[in-house]
Image: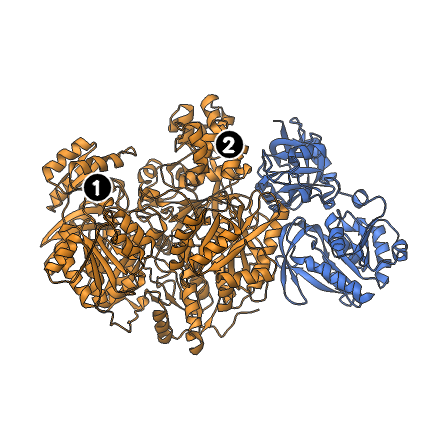
Chain colours: A orange, B blue
Amino acid sequence: MPRNNEIKKVLVIGSGPIVIGQAAEFDYAGTQACRSLKEEGLEVVLLNSNPATIMTDKDIADRVYIEPLTVEVVEQLVLKEKPDSVLPTLGGQAALNLAMELEENGFLRRNNVRLIGTTSETIKKAEDRLEFKTTMEKIGEPCAASLVVESVEEGVRFAEKIGYPVVLRPAYTLGGSGGGIAKNRGQLMEILENGLRLSRVGQVLVERCIAGWKEIEYEVMRDGAGNCITVCNMENIDPVGVHTGDSIVVAPSQTLGDKEYQMLRTSALNIISELNITGGCNVQYALHPETFEYCVIEVNPRVSRSSALASKATGYPIAKVAAKIALGYTLDEIKNAVTKKTYASFEPMLDYCVVKIPRLPFDKFISAKRTLTTQMKATGEVMSICDNFEGALMKAIRSLEQHVDSLMSYDYSHLPQEELLEELAVVDDRRIWKIAEALRRGISYDEIHEISQIDKWFIDKLAVLVEMEARLKKEPLTRELLKEAKRIEFPDQVIAQLAGKTAQEISNMRYADGITASYKMVDTCAAEFAAQTPYYYSVYGSENEVEKTSGRKKVLVLGSGPIRIGQGIEFDFCSVHCTWAFSREGYETIIVNNNPETVSTDFDIADKLYFEPLTPEDVRSIVDLERPDGAVVQFGGQTAIKLTESLMKMGVPILGTSAENVDAAEDRELFDEILEKCGIPRPAGGTVFTAEEAKKVADELGYPVLVRPSYVLGGQGMQIAINDHDIEEFIGIINRIAQDHPILVDKYLQGKEIEVDAVCDGEDILIPGIMEHIERAGIHSGDSISVYPARSISEKTKRTIEEYTKKLARSLHVIGLINIQFIVCGEEVYVIEVNPRSSRTVPYISKVTGIPVVSLAAKVIIGGKIRELGYTPGLAPEADYFAVKMPVFSFEKIRGADISLGPEMKSTGECLGIAKTFDEALYKAFLGAGIKLPKHKNMIITVRDEDKEKAVEIGRRFERIGYRIFATRGTAQAMKAAGVRANAVSKIEQESPNLMDLILGHKIDLIIDTPPQGAERAKDGFVIRRNAIETGVNVLTAIDTAEALIESLENTNIRKLTLIDIAAVG
Amino acid sequence: MMKAFLILEDGTVFAGTSIGSTKEAVSEIVFNTSMTGYLEVLTDPSYAGQAVAMTYPLIGNYGITPDMESERAWPKGYIVRELSRIPSNFRSEGTIQDFLEKQDIPGIAGIDTRALTKILREKGTMNGMITVNADYDLDEILPRLKGYRVGDVVAETTCRKPYTIAGSGPKVALMDFGAKKNIARSLNWRGCAVTVYPAFTPAEEIIASAPDGIMLSNGPGDPEECAAVIEEIKKLYDTDIPIFAICLGHQLMALANGAKTYKLKYGHRGGNHPVKDLSNGRVYISAQNHGYAVDAATLDASVAKEAFVNVNDGTNEGFSYVGKNIFTVQFHPEACPGPQDSGYLFDRFMDMMKGAR
């Protein structure tokens, strides 16, 4: 079937801010789809509130709206842009839910806009629990015994009929929000109550627990003519019970025979056909480990995280093909972009093994429970490819960048046997390390399997790795042994440690013996056809397939690895734009990265893609082969920066700012010298290694002080200390991991925080804009609301900032990007941090100023000059609208995480509000972040002493718009004294009725809770904040955020939003 | 671990470790891209005379299950990247290592199967030898390899005497050219009483048994080697009995009607080949295992219409015979291993038999 020519202008809806369960995979899918639509000559209108994405670039779509994802906005946008079609299947659950509402309220029909990619009937059949079950019954596909309930009583009745444990899944939520497994009535009531509230339709599925069964997924494609194929199947190493996003997953399945494989494949095809899906779909199964019995767990009638993974695992571009199908093409009409010989209507065959490991945020949320459940907690993931499972697992482990490089990285040797066996039953992110320890102790496969339910095949593979550890310890390191260790991807460092040698010795031995990595191609077809796509993975002991390329200059672009808090999708945006810029300048581009969710690992972004860990050893193997003319590290976040020294040792020139200058910005003494020379003030401070030294420095500075390790991302480990006790605690936490660099202790200044990104060509600088944070210093810049252009600093201060930026960039000999954070107290400007590299704000500032910061930086790096590139050096003229970047959090997903904001970053994503007036921009930003007020017009205020004065004024303004205020005693008194009506309530440790009763009574819209500074902050009010978050109440922990919110609420009379086409900016 | 070598007729040598039997084997080397179903592959009689290399690198993961497609293993050699140390599956009855030994199949593991596949893809299917003799002499071996012919392997693989699988539905005569069990099973499962005949059974005997339908099975080797069988098929064609043919059977029916077959460069072996039903444009993913194909242009359009083509390379995948109740396919609707998408063709055959009755 040829393309439907009635489709001329398509509105593509993105997935909004990155939250746990809905992350970078949708930028990848959306970007691929938009490019695919444009390839067909269609006009593409894009809506996504997330400014950090590549899809919201004017290169990707014709019209780009970075606006809140609400029904009102889509309606207004449809009326303004008049698209003939809406494509909602590439923007995750967020886009799908929007499409459903627009269809249900009749808007699309009234305006003659068709939904393409799926129909509302399909969405309903797949997403509505009851309809889904009925549909599955109709075609004889088994589901676990289940019932959709709308009340707790109903749920209890059903659970008691089918027996505990039961699984709870709320309808229409992301990443299984609010779900869980209940083993008894108490747990059931707790989870169910919460789930009912989180579900958009107030429904929760109560289901027979099939925990322990194998979890298998199929990625299926179907076209409008009814042709279907499966792209890939995947097996979760963790059996059913852990969200697939938090499981270690292998592709293809390893423990299924052809009978099981085909049985589930046929089932998946039957399901996609019955649901009448056109495009991509993901079907999840539970398979009984000892029979052919299976249950359909879930169907996602859209591209998903799993489909991004399947795309990268096979080379089959699911989103691209889904977009073409939406236009009416059939699978046999779409060329396979990898082989360019075959068609999309074939099934990829793998001749390698793929392992995915989730990146969990427990390093950020120390207090959080590490237990994994059906509620996804991972912020990102890594993928690796090898011709054996052990090697793929080892590569994935070291790709995590969590100080792990083998199965010895977490030590459980001290655990008594009984405790170890108990630990094996705990499903958390460290279970494979515990299994390794069990294997070292000779605990049988049977016993480990019995406890963990993990298939013995996987246990045996872990045993292979453990046996190699033992051999390397005991046996002489022969060439044969070394070859075998490398075949299963032991890094040199680990071999050295076991064999009692240095990594250098191992490396020398390898090179002398010719034991080096070779590269194989991901070609979708197991070498059956010649493929054109240079997408590679490393193996040892095989023939190398990489074709020598020469002629053009070669640049190596290092990616940013897995998405984690503090290093998100923004760095992928930078890496991709850098690659494109170099490509336009005639370079051959090579990307190294290991994140399957991102655009940078799409096979047609760079000339060559190496899907590999980003460690010095892995990068060196690529460098040996490719001999690049230079490497760019400034766009890949800390991951890439950390490789700088190693790259230089390999003889690869660092393009842009030199390594010494990167160091100068991080090395306190060098940096202080530069500041002094430039005459730029910074908060007083010192460098220390121990708590004693720190206390001495703090004593001289006077509390409060800021404590942090150097060379970190996202403020990791950064804290505000108010006394000696805090110092001891914080230094202790930092020193849990051996520090190569000193710890910094600085005077904490509470002023306005200002941030700039700038491009420097060695002479001139260009500052696209000055950003001001709403929250005062002390809250991580990534967690602050950021406003462009800065509105509350004077013209003089702006000039000072421009001047300082110029001086710093020049003194550090920056070639490319620099990010500087300032604190402004009155007219005084202090520098608090300088990063001579790209930053989190680069995509945002690029989009709102229309200045393509990354490509400009790339041009400067290869010798371009700002003046010659058509820009006037200095601070660019301010735009005539405001842009507000709002952080978005995923606290409800991480049980036990402290939600109060501080110097350590906690947000997972961001959204943008852009408008002619500040009020409207702010309003849009809150709307985009999903803060929906008011419902009940009840709020709680409990603030620390320093905030009381401001809290009273904020309370007054909330009262004015009709809010009923509850406050803890001290706060209430302060309010009453100022004439604000406040109802005093008891703190939670006091007797009922107290704060907790109010929160659990579900009548509260908002809590303003600012904890005191210092180590105690985390403890005070922790239970309240957790309970509030978990019951879906908005909680603000910074008084400035609260002020911004009331300002925005006072302007909710902004009925009609003005929508701004970002593509037309600049 | 004993060393083993795979020597190709172009002089390429792969060194690995010996698996299964240590006897020397000269055969045609082919590759199969299926990711599951290694046991079905090993017991598919169509591999007689060939050594098969699995492109999927991890083989033996679920051990030996009851999923055999014939009574024994047929390939002359087995080539893998890695055999699993332990099998893990509730139906596993043993390891693939033991199976290969018991079946006396020599094999080699630990070689770069992807490099081998690329050689076969680029240069075409060729002969080779698996040996554990480290003192091999290429000058002596290569002429032997070049001289090897798969030959008339149908005679080897077909059953010795007829047998019947009871059923209450239509009577089907299944001509066994090296049939996979699941062909008979697919018919029997639909109720058919299936009588399996040796390949060289005279057409008269089959016709005399008055079957409701005739099924021509898959089988190994070059179809042109089966001159005698083709003569019998001509006689079957002349009757009004509905005929459904798979793979070799499909090629033999075409040859019986004057078409030509030719050897594909490296064949189609795997479970991911898209075939298009030309009657309605639908595409199905099919299981395939063939080294030869029918040149559709050589079959008179008034005799048979092309019914299926391969989406990837446009080669013929099936015919519908004009004015006859005969349809034939190159691929394997019986799957095992591979996708079951084209299983509906057995239903079509059922309908055809009902209609003719």
The residue located at (53%, 43%) in the rendering is A352
Q: Secondary structure at mark 2?
A: helix
Q: Label 1 lies in what chain?
A: A
> x, y (%) of residue B283?
62, 61
Q: Amino acid at mark 1?
A: Ala
Q: In the rendered view, would you say B357 is above or below B39? A: below
Viewport quadrant of the C terminus of chain A: bottom left
Q: Quadrant of residue A1017?
A: top left
Foreground pick, A746 / A731: A731
Q: In the rendered view, would you say A973 is above or below A1054? A: above
Viewport quadrant of the N terminus of chain A: bottom right
Label 1 vs 2, first from the N-terminus: 2
User: Circle 2 is placed at which residue position?
Assistant: A463
Q: Secondary structure at mark 1?
A: helix
Query: Image check: A123 left or right of A493?
Result: right
> x, y (%) of residue A731?
23, 35
Instruction: Specify whether residue A863 is in view.
Output: no
Instruction: Specify whether residue A506 is in view.
Output: yes
> x, y (%) of residue A127?
48, 61
Q: Amino acid at mark 2?
A: Ala
Query: Image check: A368 left or right of A957?
Result: right
Q: Label 2 lies in what chain?
A: A
* Real-space Cα separation, disc 1 to disc 2, in angstroms: 43 Å
Query: Image check: A613 left or right of A1011?
Result: right
The local crowd at label 2, few if under 14, some if 14 to 19, many if 20 or more residues have their Cα within 10 Å, is many
> x, y (%) of residue A402?
36, 39
Q: Confirm or deny contact between disc 1 and disc 2 (CB under 8 A).
A: no
User: Circle 1 is placed at which residue position?
Assistant: A1015
